[in-house]
Amino acid sequence: MSPTRLFRTVATAEAVTWAGLLVGMFLKYVTHTTELGVRVFGMLHGTVFIAYLLTTVLVAVDRRWTLGRTALGLASAVPPFLTLWFERHVESRGGLAPTWRLLEEEPTRGPERPVAWLLRNPLRGAATGLVAVVALTGVALLVGPPVG
């Protein structure tokens, strides 16, 4: 999967799960009908949120984004739907590409080495990403929800 397609897919999923969580919050706190939406979409959104953050770092290292662009990409996951804007913004400015740079080039910087390994070993890379998402989601569950 290309960096553009991966980033677009995860950014869209993050926005969709935000929408589900907002609907769930409306049902729970405004209509007082059910909290099921918050339970389901809260967990789903948290998991996709972490996947978005990891994907942003992966693409940022491969595409050599500036620290500012990377920080903006990470921060765009916090307000609802901003990941959609950021994805379009970064693509329009050449920050995404149809191919992974580190599949062709040798890594020259510290963070590029593990990213190159992940990309050059796609099954192991996908498994590593999945384990990272599950582990970080587990840590988030231990810490507790962001708002009481």
Image (cartoon, rainbow, N blue to C red):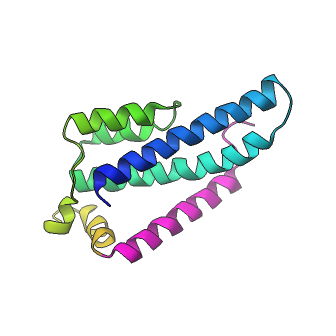
Residue 139: percent from the left, percent from the top? Answer: 62, 58
Looking at the rendered image, the quarter that the N terminus falls into is bottom left
Q: Residue at x 20, y 64 (%)?
A: 102
The region drawn magenta spans 121-148
By secondary structure, the bulk of the magenta-drawn segment is best described as: helix
Looking at the rendered image, the quarter that the C terminus falls into is top right
Which of the pair 56/2 is nearer the observer? 2
Q: Residue at x 29, y 32 (%)?
A: 89
Answer above or below: position of 127 versus 35.
below
Left or right of 120? Residue 29 is right
Residue 28: percent from the left, percent from the top? Answer: 80, 32
Residue 38: percent from the left, percent from the top? Answer: 73, 40
Left or right of 72? Residue 51 is right
Which of the pair 44/108 is nearer the observer? 44
Does 140 appear in magenta? yes
Residue 119 found in image quarter: bottom left
Does 53 appear in magenta? no
Q: Residue at x 51, y 30 (%)?
A: 79
Residue 121: percent from the left, percent from the top? Answer: 32, 76
Answer above or below: position of 9 versus 16.
below
Q: Residue furthest left?
A: 105
Residue 109 found in image quarter: bottom left
Q: Residue furthest top?
A: 30
Left or right of 52? Residue 67 is left
Q: Residue at x 21, y 50 (%)?
A: 97
Question: Total of numbered circles in the picture?
Answer: 0
Residue 68 found in image quarter: top left
